[in-house]
Image: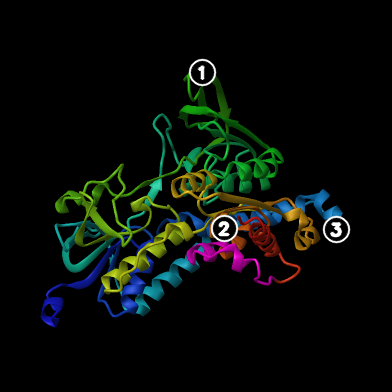
Amino acid sequence: MSDASAASFDFDLIVIGAGYGGFDAAKHAADHGLRTAIVESRDMGGTCVNRGCVPSKALLAASGRVRELADAEHLRGFGIHAAPVRFERQKIADHANQLVATIRTNLTRSLERAGATILRGKGRLEGPQRVAVREASGIERVYSARDVIIATGSDPFVPPGIETDGRTVFTSDEAISLEWLPRWIAIIGSGYIGLEFADVYTALGCEVTMIEALDRVMPTFDPDIAKIAARKLIDGRDIDARAGVLAKTVTPGSPVRIELVEMVSREPVEILEVDAVLVATGRVPVSKELNLESVGVTTNRGFIPVDEAMRVLVDDKPLAHLWAVGDVTGKMMLAHTAAAQGGVAVDNILGHQRLIDYRSIPAATFTHPEISSVGLSESDAKALAASDGFELGLVRSYFKANSKALAELESDGLMKLLFNRSSGEVLGAHIYGLHAADLIQEIANAVARRQSVRELANEVHTHPTLSEVVEVAYKQAAAALA
C-alpha cells in the first residue's frame, strides 16, 4: 500500500469499544505502528474493569477472608481460636471501587503511552471504513479508517416479566457496588455470576435462595464437577437452591415479590417475598445501535458473525476491513477471550495470518473453592470420539490425595481429565478445588500445543504443591493409553 492511500484515511484502525477486547486490540495496533483510535461512551475498561471481573474479585477476596475467619471449625483443625469476625460493608465496597479506579487509570494511560487516540462518545458505522462518533454534547463527527474493529461487548440479560429498579431488583452491574446487604436475597440463575455472588452474600451473612430454570443447578458446568462442588458451595451454605422453576414475574419493592412457576408445565409453584433479587441470567450483545445494516451485516440474536480470523461475515463470506471481537461475537463471553480475539484481529490486519483457538481458552469461577475448565466438555469429547473413531479416555484425580491440600485442610476437590486413548492428546479438563483457576492454565497450555499425556506424564512438578493434582492425572492417563 502506498503512503498516499494510507494517508487518505484519518486512522489506520478505529476500535469501537474500550472494554478488554477493544483495549487489547488498540494497544497491540498502536504498539505496532498503526495510527489507532478507540471510541468509548462509558467508562474505559468496559464490563470487566468496571462492572465485572475486577470489582467482583475484590468483593470475593474480602468476603473470602470473612468466610475463613468465621469458619471456627476449620480454624480449630489448625488449633486456632479466633474472635468473632467483624467487617465494614462500606470498606469492602470501597476496596472494589478503588481497585476499579486504579485499573481503569492504568489501562487508559497505557493506551495513551502506546500512542492511541481516545475518542469519547458513542460509535457507529457509517458505511464501509467510516465511523461516526456522537459526543455527549450531541456533536457528531465522522472519521475514516482503513480497518474497523467492533468491540462493543455485552450487557446483563433481564428476562421478560422481571422488572428491575437498580436497588431491590438488580443485575451484576449494580451488585458490584455492594450498596447494602439484604437479609434474604434471591439469585436468579446458577451460572458463574450467580455462584460468585452467592459466595459473597453468604460469607457476609445473607440468606440466599437460588432459582434455576433448567433441570439442574449449575447447568453450565461438568455434571460430575457440579455435583461435588454443590455439596460445599450450595448445600454447605445458607442457600436454598431450586432447579426447574422459573421466575415468571419479579416486582420490585419492599418486599420484592417473585412469582415462581414450573419451568416445563408453567404451573404455579409459589409466591416468594424477599428483600432483594439479583438477576444473573446471562448476557446479551450490545449491537443494536451500530448501524450494521449500512454494511449489510445481519446479526444472529444480536451477535455479530465472525470467522476464526475475526473478520465479520456477510452470507458466510468475510467483509473487507471489518472485524469484531469480544462478547459481541458471542463465542466465549470472557474477558481474556475478548483480549485474545483482539490480538488475532490486529495480527491479521498487520498481515500476519492467525486464527483463534477457542479449545485452549480456560474459564474459571472464583468461588471458595474455585471451579475451572478448558477444552471440551465430556459430552462434546464423546461426540468427537464417535465422529473421529477413537476411544475417549477419562481419569479423575482427587485433592484429598494431595499433600498441600491436606496441609491447608482444603482437600475437597476433583480434577477430571479427558484425552484421546490412542494418541494421548489432551482434549479438556474440569477442576473443582483450591486454586483451580490457577491450576487450569497448565492444561490449557497442553491443549494449545495439542500435547499428549505420553510426554506430559514425565514433566516434574514441585512437591508439595497443588500442581501435583495435574501430574497425577497425566500419569493415570498415560497408564491408560490403548
Question: Which residue is the site of mark 2?
Answer: 57
Quarter where residue 324 is shown: bottom left
Question: Which residue is the site of mark 3?
Answer: 78
Cα separation between marks 1 and 3: 49 Å
Question: Which residue is the site of mark 1?
Answer: 268
Name the image quarter holding the N terminus. Answer: bottom left
Give the x, y percent position of residue 295: 16, 54
- 161 is higher (above) or lower (below) than 28: above
Q: Residue furthest bottom?
A: 3
Q: Amino acid at mark 2?
A: Lys
Q: Residues within 10 Å of mark 3 (few under 14, many from 20)?
A: few
* Sequence-earlier tag: 1 or 3: 3
Position of 265 with respect to 90 (left or right) is: left
- 255 is higher (above) or lower (below) than 419: above
* Sequence-earlier tag: 1 or 2: 2
The mark lying in front, picked from 2 and 3, is 3
Q: Secondary structure at mark 1?
A: strand
Q: Secondary structure at mark 2?
A: helix
Residue drawn 59% across the image and 41% down it: 223
Residue drawn 17% across the image and 49% down it: 293
For the residues labelled 2 and 3, say whether their Cβ atoms are less than 8 Å apart.
Answer: no
Q: Residue furthest top?
A: 267
Position of 229 with respect to 104 (left or right) is: right
Cα separation between marks 1 and 2: 37 Å
Span colored in magenta = 443-461
Q: Amino acid at mark 1?
A: Pro
Give the x, y percent position of residue 84: 80, 51
Residue 88 shows in this picture: no
